[in-house]
Image (tube, grey):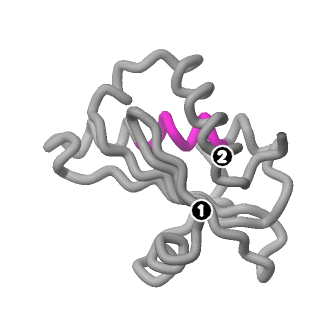
Amino acid sequence: MISRTHRFHGYNSLRHVYRQGRASRGALFAVKSAPNPRRKTYRAAVVVSRKVNKSAVARNRIRRRIYEVIRQLEGQITQPCDIVVTVFHSTVLETPHAELSGQLKKQLKEAGSLSK
């Protein structure tokens, strides 16, 4: 799990990233990233809709898995930016960690928030 300083939420923060961010869409989730020069480090949010899975336990498990992958990649995030990962497929729950990590790393590079 990433630390509290690296998490963000709130409708206005998410709206800014959705409007201004660069997008990268994959098979399981989409990543949007927007630079934020007012910060010293990155912030990340994971959005899992109730349409993905009705169970709150499952949605929270998906969220924790994505946050863990982001935590492992935090040394490679070079600039202060806001990252929003929008999950739209329930198979993220059963996807192996290595595959999930590779997919997220690839999409973060495409969105421009990970060093090449």
Residue 113 lies in the magenta stretch: no
Q: Is residue 76 above or below residue 33?
A: above
x, y percent for residue 48: 33, 50
x, y percent for residue 84: 52, 58
- Residue positioned 76% across, 45% down in the render: 74
> Which amino acid lies under the numbered mark 2 shown in the image of this protein?
Glu
Q: Which secondary structure lies at badge 1?
A: strand
Q: Is residue 43 above or below residue 114?
A: below
Name the dominant secondary structure of the magenta segment.
helix
Q: Which residue is mark 2?
A: 110
x, y percent for residue 61: 37, 36
x, y percent for residue 53: 19, 40
> Would residue 40 be found to the left or right of residue 10 on screen?
right
Q: Quadrant of residue 6 in the image?
A: bottom right
Q: Which residue is mark 1?
A: 22
Q: Quadrant of the N terminus?
A: top right
- Disc on the earlier residue, 1 or 2: 1
> Would residue 11 be found to the left or right of residue 54 on screen?
right
Q: Quadrant of residue 113 in the image?
A: bottom right
> Which amino acid lies under the numbered mark 1 shown in the image of this protein?
Arg
Q: Are marks 1 and 2 in contact (CB under 8 Å)?
A: yes
> Looking at the rendered structure, which numbered label has been put on residue 75?
none
Q: Quadrant of the C terminus?
A: top right
